């Protein structure tokens, strides 16, 4: 498929087209700032000049640790425009998680909000990398050569302030990106102990954003509310780039709060919104909803048929569509289309992206499944990642020699070629909009001196759909209460990874173990739900 005939395939070309089509249309609206496309292009050019003055080279990794807003978008587009690679930092990370992401991706330059969502990231970085008080680099992060601190009047001596960084860019710099350049390294949880950095290109993300926005029904000057964090591909591809490709306005916020989201949708006259099932339920069940005069026309939702039905009927988003994807596919693999019948869209029978192939494989025999038969979803085509950064064995396990990506997710293909998603990878816990790998949580718990074994499973939750539950076996003679262990863990992992429940057990034999002495997670999850009365 000739993608170049479909849409711009670099962020720079997409920005230039948006400016040509709609220079005075608002590009980004945030609670404390808003910019039109012409202003955004000027900001990108200014940052690009400063990046060039800082010696940033093609392919170098540049970290962004900020809340949602125009500055995040301008940085992302400027970094991409010179062929460098953006590394978004999850602003819910704790110190160990931040250090891992910066070290593993070998970030050279970091843009750091001094405080993001009331978290003192500057203090967190001080604890990781003491050299920011004197001069970088630091042995803890040997590749980090420079930190630019935003929103801080007196940044540490070993860092640079935002104004000083911009002031150095006195000479304009040309955009040099190409469609095949890596644009983003997205950290995603898998079934291993540590997150993997998914490498996505300009081509895969720009085309994905274009198709997704088109199937959602975005038009020039539409207003799309999305509080999806920009450190996720739902933020970069499905929010920033979908709007950029269609010259639509992105209305965003630092942190999703249903009442404020409803107020913004009304005040900004939003035509579309994006959300997962948890966000949608929070909007639908909020006491302010009935009094808000919304003018929604459509939505992109990762939600069950019952919730999609309510989005259409109660929020008025009659053109609501549903998508299936994963970070490794930029992210959308398949999506329904706004012009299709309500029955097709509510039942989430999705068309694969044009030019993207989908197969369903029987996990035991390896054969292709018949139409309507459930099996593992395999994906091949332009949206698939380049691989995991600096993890060749993990890349080889996910991508075969023919380019097929093993998603680990379960689905079925109808005789009409539409994909129906049946379930996420068997071990991933989906906490609201976050994917949590049990092994990652277990790895942290296992660092506690009193813990001999920890096993984490997902249990139902009425608001977040699923939350982690930990079963812990203590070392012989060790003393620790459930509350003590949770308090210890709270300081060492992001809040969405923290077990909502923790139970001390003597062992797992009565619950079920495999012949190789591994705990069977499915029976354990069922046991946990029954034990906690979550049925």
Image: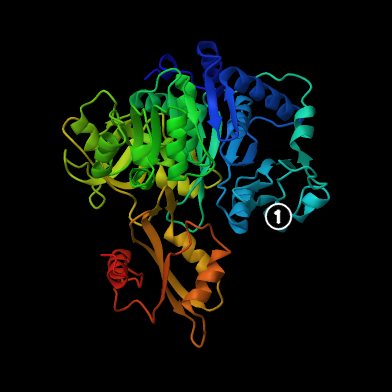
Q: Is residue 103 left or right of residue 438?
A: right
Q: What residue appears at the point 58 percent right and 31 percent down from the top-left corner? A: 73
Which class describes the residues within 10 Å of circle 1: few (<14), some (14-19), or many (20+)?
some
User: Closer to the camera, 39 or 176?
Assistant: 39
Tell me if residue 8 can be seen.
yes
Secondary structure under badge 1? helix
The residue at which mark 1 appears reads as 123
Where is residue 200 drawn, in percent x and y?
Answer: 50, 35
User: Closer to the camera, 493 or 224?
Assistant: 224
Tell me if residue 404 can be seen.
no
Where is residue 275 drawn, in percent x and y?
Answer: 39, 40
Q: What residue appears at the point 52 percent right and 47 percent down from the top-left corner? A: 391
User: Closer to the camera, 473 or 24?
Assistant: 24
Which quadrant of the figure contains the N terminus? Answer: top left
Q: Residue furthest top?
A: 20
In the image, residue 531 sits, relative to residue 38, either above or below, namely below
Which quadrant holds residue 166? Answer: top right
Q: Is residue 102 left or right of residue 277?
A: right
Where is residue 145 drawn, in percent x and y?
Answer: 75, 43
Which quadrant holds residue 217? Answer: top left
Where is residue 325 drawn, in percent x and y?
Answer: 37, 39
Q: What residue appears at the point 64 percent right and 45 percent down from the top-left corner? A: 106
In the image, residue 135 sits, relative to residue 504, either above or below, namely above
């Amino acid at each position: 498929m000739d993608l170049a005939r479909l849409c711009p395939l670099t962020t720079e070309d997409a920005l230039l087209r948006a400016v040509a089509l709609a220079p005075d249309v608002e590009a980004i609206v945030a609670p404390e700032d808003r910019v039109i496309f012409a202003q955004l292009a000027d900001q990108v050019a200014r940052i690009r000049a400063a990046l060039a003055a800082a010696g940033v080279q093609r392919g170098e990794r540049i970290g962004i640790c900020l809340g949602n807003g125009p500055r995040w978008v301008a940085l992302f587009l400027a970094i991409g425009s010179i062929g460098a690679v953006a590394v978004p930092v999850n602003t819910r990370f704790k110190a160990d998680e931040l250090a891992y992401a910066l070290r593993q991706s070998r970030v050279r330059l970091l843009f750091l909000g001094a405080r993001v969502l009331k978290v003192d990231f500057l203090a967190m970085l001080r604890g990781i990398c003491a050299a920011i008080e004197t001069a970088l680099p630091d042995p803890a992060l040997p590749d980090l050569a420079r930190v630019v601190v935003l929103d801080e009047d007196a940044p540490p001596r070993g860092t640079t302030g935002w104004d000083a960084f911009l002031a150095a860019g006195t000479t304009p710099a040309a955009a040099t990106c190409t469609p095949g350049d890596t644009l983003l390294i997205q950290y995603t949880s898998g079934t291993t102990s540590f997150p993997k950095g998914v490498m996505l290109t300009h081509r895969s993300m720009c085309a994905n954003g274009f198709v997704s926005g088109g199937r959602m029904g975005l038009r020039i000057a539409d207003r799309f509310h999305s509080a999806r964090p920009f450190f996720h591909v739902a933020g970069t591809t499905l929010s920033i780039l979908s709007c950029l490709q269609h010259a639509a306005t992105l209305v965003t916020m630092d942190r999703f709060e249903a009442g404020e989201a409803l107020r913004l949708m009304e005040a900004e006259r939003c035509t579309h919104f994006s959300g997962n099932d948890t966000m949608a339920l929070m909007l639908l069940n909020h006491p302010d909803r009935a009094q808000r005069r919304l003018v929604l026309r459509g939505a992109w939702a990762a939600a069950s048929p019952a919730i999609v039905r309510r989005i259409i009927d109660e929020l008025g988003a009659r053109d609501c569509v549903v998508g299936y994807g994963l970070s490794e596919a930029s992210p959308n693999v398949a999506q329904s289309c706004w012009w299709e019948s309500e029955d097709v869209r509510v039942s989430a029978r999705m068309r694969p992206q044009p030019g993207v192939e989908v197969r369903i494989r029987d996990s035991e025999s390896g054969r292709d499944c018949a139409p309507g038969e459930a099996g593992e979803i395999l994906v091949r085509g332009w949206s698939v990642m380049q691989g995991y950064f600096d993890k060749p064995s993990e890349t080889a396990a996910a991508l075969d020699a023919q380019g097929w990506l093993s998603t680990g997710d379960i689905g079925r293909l109808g005789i009409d070629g539409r994909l129906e998603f049946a379930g996420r990878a068997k071990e991933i816990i989906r906490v609201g909009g976050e994917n949590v790998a049990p092994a990652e949580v277990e790895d942290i718990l296992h660092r506690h001196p009193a813990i001999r074994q920890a096993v984490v499973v997902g249990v139902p939750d009425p608001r977040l759909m699923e939350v982690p539950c930990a079963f812990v076996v203590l070392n012989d003679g060790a003393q620790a209460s459930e509350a003590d262990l949770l308090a210890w863990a709270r300081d060492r992992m992001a809040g969405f990874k923290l077990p909502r429940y923790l139970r001390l057990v003597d062992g797992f034999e009565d619950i079920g173990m495999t012949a190789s002495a591994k705990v069977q997670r499915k029976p354990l999850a069922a046991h946990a739900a029954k034990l906690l009365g979550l049925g």
